[in-house]
Amino acid sequence: MTDLTLLLDRRLLRARKRAVPMQRHLYDLLRQAILDGRLLAGSALPASRVLARELGVARNSVIHAYDQLAAEGYVQASRQGTVVAALPNRQVVSAEPTHHAQMVAPAMANRVQALNRRRTAEQDLMPFMPGIPALDAFPSRTWRRLVRNAWRDQSSACLSYRPVMGELELRQAIATHVRASRGVVCSVDQVFVTNGTQDSLSLCAHALADVGQRAWLEHPGYGGARVACQAAGLRVVPVPVDEHGLAPTAALWRHQPPRLIYTTPSHQYPLGSVLSLARRLALIKQAQATGAWILEDDYDSEFRHDGPPLAAMQGLVPNAPVVYLGTFSKSMFPALRLGFIVVPEATVDQWQGVLGELVRRGQPAEQAALAAFINEGHFTQHLRKMRQLYAERQAALREALARHWPWPGDVLGGACGLHLALTLSADIPDAQAAAAAMARGLSPRPLSAYGTGGAPLNGLVMGYANLPAEQMDTRVKQMARAINAGLAR
């Protein structure tokens, strides 16, 4: 038996137990032997008939492996038969990962160096994870029917790239809905479908500001806005939030005027305050005076518990420099990945040109199904049901905290949305408390993680929407015990 068959035989026999063609296994093993230097340049490979006989495989498998290696430049034909080619600047590469090997690669961009999201999809579904709606209460059967109908009605042309504005039927449904429920002043031409809020934020950060310009973000605030602005090369300026919402000072306007202002006026994320009417009007006036854009993120205002949803900033002042951002991740389900922006009428043509260069739109069936979901009344019915359900789950969380939470603190928010914020005293580090809860299968977020550059706040952000009311008492008790045990270590 040749040296090559000694090299390959044992591993090939192991490979036969797996449902992968023998020719592919043989190709992989020969290629790796060449790359890691066990087969040197100029080495002659056995004739296909000889290697097939010694390995006990079909000759065609060897021929196919040799042909693939030759096509990719690893071997070449010569008078000596098939020989290993000389590969320029070849470095030894191992097929098996080694603990001591270090990858030599260029550094990633400076603007993403601080990004470090480590949560998994499984952790996102744990009790108390903020931002996850009641997935168990979504009308999946109705949705599946609408999606099937949408695919049935799609022509072959719909499989190509779709209009960058989104499907007209969905944009019309969105325009009708936000005009009636949110007081947004718009025509269908001003509505653009996106792949969710994060996509909307990224598009706005790139389209409305240049590298190095300032973006004002609420502090504490939504981390996705910070990520979008940093990835676009903008300078993030934290703006404090109080019980009346975003609270920029006169000095901030003078010394650090913004190009973008990101705000969640109807339900500040994560503290839950509402931006007062006086501040809304003042913010619009100052933005007009300084040439700034306001990004109004209306992420969960559909779920107001103490009255009808508040009117949007967008419709307060004619021709206001406000881009209204909406999402279906909270009102429907996160995996849908559909959102929208409403842009000022005077900028529609520019937005169409920009999006024509930046995006390639798809999801025609999902957009058609969502339009039908809205137009047939299922969306309004679902929102009505969810408002009641979330009010019940929030009440259950408050009652459980009153019974089992042993530490002093304030419960913030609650008039709207899917979460509560709970402050903690300084002797209970929120990151440590959240880690202790995570170890027990619970997923509240530390309030300090929502900082955008100012002094961090200490507390926990607790989602209640995806946790049944009857489990709330047990889960809060479990979390209090986990945190108490974690602090005692």
Image: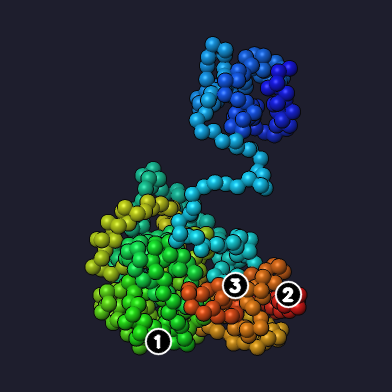
Q: Which quadrant of the structure image shows residue 30?
A: top right
Pointer 1: what residue?
276
Compare marks 1 and 3 and give the one earlier in the sequence. Answer: 1
Mark 1 and mark 3: span between their CA atoms? 27 Å
* In this rendering, the label closer to the viewer, 1 or 3: 3
- Say whether residue 120 is visible: yes
Compare marks 2 and 1 and give the one earlier in the sequence. Answer: 1
Pointer 3: what residue?
445
Residue at 68% across, 22% down: 4
Secondary structure beneath dot 1 equals: loop
Secondary structure beneath dot 2 equals: helix
Residue at 37% across, 51% down: 360
Pointer 2: what residue?
486
Q: Nearer the viewer, residue 280 or 335?
A: 280
Which residue type does callout 2 highlight?
Answer: Gly
Residue at 51% across, 62% down: 115
Q: Which quadrant of the structure image shows residue 136?
A: bottom right
Badge 1 vs badge 3, beta-carbon distance below 8 Å: no
Q: Is residue 248 above or below residue 450?
A: below
User: Percent x, y for residue 485?
Assistant: 75, 76
Which residue type does callout 1 highlight?
Answer: Ser
Bin the neighbour count of mark 2 within 10 Å (Cα to Cα): few under 14, some 14-19, many 20 and up. some
User: Percent x, y for residue 349?
Assistant: 24, 61
User: Percent x, y for residue 93?
Assistant: 60, 37
Residue at 73% across, 32% down: 14
Bin the neighbour count of mark 1 within 10 Å (Cα to Cα): few under 14, some 14-19, many 20 and up. some
